[in-house]
Image (spheres, coloured by chain):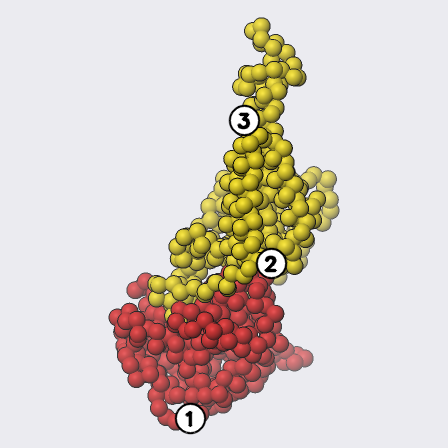
């Protein structure tokens, strides 16, 4: 120690006063913050998996991002317009074939799709199956209510199945696009849909810095956990820590944004953004986008031919 | 000084305060010759990074004047499109925080960003990106996202993104901070090589160990943000009192048997300065 600074006596004392290093049997559950950290780590892992799939040598990975975006949009619109379950099942089967051709594990792919189904359609689908929402022929009676038979109706089940099939096909199409295209190319392809260049740049940077801030959050939470000693938790204390951490993170993000702007200026950015030119569209890209659009028209036309 | 005495940068009485309240630089003057390698030495918070940002035309002094390549550099002049493009082409700045500098979604886009903004032809950009990635041995990282890179790899990408513009003047802020020994050695060799190739280099550091290798001259800043001394590395490193005053070394006390004695100590070279 310099300048006559002396070490306090309690710092030099041993660990005699510390609690014994033994198990008491009383366990503490992981709080919301720990779960958040787990969630953040999962998010980074997911992003890494997606980038790894996008780098594989599969059918969709070989296609230009713009082609995939337009083709998938065409098929998505067609999926939204189809009104027959067999046609939707056909579309879903097509996404499975494309996934297999793009070297995506079918089990893994299907699991990811069906994980989202209850989330997106559960709330809408569940009540629609009952006779009090969709009247019709009751196929599974559940009881009587004021003299009326209550249960699941054929019409209700059909419309629920229709929605589930539509959502499954749509999510599969979107997943195929996002899994087989690196995020940077996907963002850049938005320019073909007339999204302004500056917005594309901002979206790209937001995605890039999401990981930097995720790292900061993880470090902050881990540092807090490393210093958490008390057995009892105070809600007020937790709220205070959450708000301090939020404030600190906001300050960090602000300082970082200023430095990023300076880094852009230092390399010639003057407010008007210049972006790299696109690679040339190949014959296979043209054939692919035309096939997708023709298929979309065929699917909608065929569906109409089947009647209502 | 390595080559002719032509002054590339002239800063006179530069002062800067953050938020107009917290002084970061007080009346600092400096002159850098073409081809020279100048080290800005000083403890944490002495104003080295602020001075580098002024030299890069990213912030502007509250007092004093700054001329680069024979022209006055000011906020107004940098608003001029031609002046701004000409200045940015000539000056490359490698930030200490690589996360701030590497902002593009992929390494390729990061390196191409500068040349694109300066309006170079696509074929030339492609060629330069390929050559600079080969030179810095990062060809295999070209399609990677920055979050998939280590600190050393990110530093290489940041340097590539600056070198690709072939600047005459290179500014490095704490270039070796946080790097492992191998990356550190590689970077010091690169700075030496760039200096020998005729580039003018100004870098901020508080590491004394490699100073004689990569600097021709040093400017020492005090903890109250003022110039403290200027001279050749060997000359300054021999001045123990100066290094202690600048907080670049500290009195290190330890025991030899029953005898307690103290001597100056600096990072990397135990007792060298004393």
Q: Residues within 10 Å of mark 1 (few under 14, many from 20)?
A: few
Q: Colour of chain A?
A: yellow
Query: Disc 3 to disc 1, how far (Cα)?
Result: 86 Å
- The reply to whether label 2 and label 1 mark residues of one chain is no
Label 3 or label 1, whichever lies nearer to me, is 3
Q: What's the chain of the residue with tag 1? A: B
State yes or no: discs 2 and 1 in contact (Cβ < 8 Å): no
Residue drawn at the location 57% of the way across and 64% of the way down: B143
Query: Disc 2 to disc 1, how far (Cα)?
Result: 52 Å
Is residue B249 at all visible to an observer of this figure? yes
Q: Which is nearer the eye, A44 or A175?
A: A175
Residue drawn at the location 51% of the way across and 61% of the way down: A281
Q: Secondary structure at mark 2?
A: helix
Label 2 or label 1, whichever lies nearer to me, is 2
Residue drawn at the location 52% of the way across and 58% of the way down: A185
Q: Quadrant of residue B57?
A: bottom left
The image shows residue A131, relative to residue B195, as above or below, that is above
Q: Which chain is red?
A: B
Q: Secondary structure at mark 1?
A: loop
Q: Secondary structure at mark 3?
A: loop
Q: Which is nearer the eye, A62 or A24?
A: A62
Residue drawn at the location 37% of the way across and 74% of the way down: B88
Q: Which is nearer the eye, A173 or B163?
A: A173
Q: What's the chain of the residue with tag 2? A: A
Residue under circle 2?
A: A62
The image shows residue B183, relative to residue B110, as above or below, that is below
Residue under circle 3?
A: A308
Residue A158, horizontal then vertical, whole percent: 60, 25
Label 2 or label 3, whichever lies nearer to me, is 3
The image shows residue A84, relative to residue A78, as above or below, that is above
Query: Disc 2 to disc 3, how far (Cα)?
Result: 38 Å
Left or right: residue B263 versus residue B120 is right
């Amino acid at each position: 120690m310099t300048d006559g600074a002396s070490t306090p006596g309690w710092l030099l004392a041993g660990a005699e006063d510390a609690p014994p290093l033994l198990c008491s049997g009383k366990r503490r559950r992981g709080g919301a913050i720990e779960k958040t950290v787990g969630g953040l780590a999962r998010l980074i892992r997911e992003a890494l998996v997606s980038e790894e799939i996008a780098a594989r040598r599969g059918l969709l990975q070989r296609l230009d991002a713009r082609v995939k975006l337009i083709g998938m949009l065409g098929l998505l619109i067609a999926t939204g317009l189809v009104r027959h379950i067999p046609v939707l099942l056909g579309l879903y089967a097509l996404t499975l074939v494309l996934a297999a051709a793009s070297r995506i594990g079918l089990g893994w792919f299907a699991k990811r799709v069906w994980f989202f189904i209850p989330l997106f359609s559960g709330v809408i689908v569940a009540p629609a199956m009952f006779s009090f929402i969709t009247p019709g022929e009751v196929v599974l009676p559940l009881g009587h209510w004021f003299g009326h038979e209550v249960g699941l109706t054929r019409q209700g089940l059909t419309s629920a199945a229709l929605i589930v099939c539509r959502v499954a096909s749509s999510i599969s199409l979107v997943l195929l696009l996002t899994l087989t295209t690196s995020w940077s190319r996907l963002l850049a392809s938005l320019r073909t849909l007339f999204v302004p260049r500056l917005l594309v740049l901002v979206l790209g940077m937001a995605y890039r810095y999401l990981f930097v801030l995720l790292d900061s959050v993880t470090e902050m939470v881990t540092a807090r956990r490393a210093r958490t000693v008390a057995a009892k938790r105070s809600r007020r204390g937790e709220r205070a820590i959450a708000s301090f951490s939020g404030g600190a993170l906001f300050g960090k993000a602000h300082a970082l944004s200023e430095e990023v702007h300076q880094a852009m200026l230092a390399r010639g950015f003057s407010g008007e953004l210049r972006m790299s030119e696109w690679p040339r569209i190949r014959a296979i890209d043209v054939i692919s986008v035309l096939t997708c659009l023709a298929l979309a028209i065929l699917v909608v036309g065929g569906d109409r031919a089947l009647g209502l | 000084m390595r080559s002719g005495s032509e002054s590339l940068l002239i800063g006179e009485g530069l002062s800067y305060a953050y938020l107009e309240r917290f002084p970061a630089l007080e009346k600092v003057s400096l002159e850098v010759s073409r081809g020279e390698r100048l080290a800005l030495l000083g403890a944490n918070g002495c104003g080295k990074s602020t001075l580098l940002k002024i030299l890069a035309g990213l912030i502007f002094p509250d007092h004093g004047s700054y001329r680069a390549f024979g022209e006055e550099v000011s906020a107004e002049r940098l608003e001029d499109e031609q002046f701004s493009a000409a200045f940015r082409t000539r000056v490359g700045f490698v930030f200490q925080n690589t996360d701030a500098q590497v902002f593009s979604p992929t390494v390729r886009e990061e390196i191409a960003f500068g040349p694109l903004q300066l309006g170079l032809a696509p074929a030339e950009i492609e060629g330069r990106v390929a050559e600079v990635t080969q030179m810095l041995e990062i060809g295999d990282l070209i399609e990677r996202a920055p979050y998939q890179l280590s600190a050393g790899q990110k530093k290489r990408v940041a340097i590539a993104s600056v070198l690709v513009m072939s600047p005459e003047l290179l500014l490095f802020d704490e270039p070796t901070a946080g790097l492992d020994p191998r990356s550190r050695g590689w970077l010091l060799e690169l700075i030496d090589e760039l200096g020998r190739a005729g580039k003018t280099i100004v870098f901020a550091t508080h590491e004394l160990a490699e100073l004689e290798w990569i600097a021709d001259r040093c400017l020492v800043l005090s903890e109250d943000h003022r110039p403290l001394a200027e001279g050749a590395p060997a000359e300054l490193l021999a001045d123990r009192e100066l290094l202690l005053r600048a907080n670049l070394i500290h009195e290190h006390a330890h025991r030899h048997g029953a005898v307690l004695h103290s001597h100056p100590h600096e990072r990397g070279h135990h007792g060298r300065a004393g």
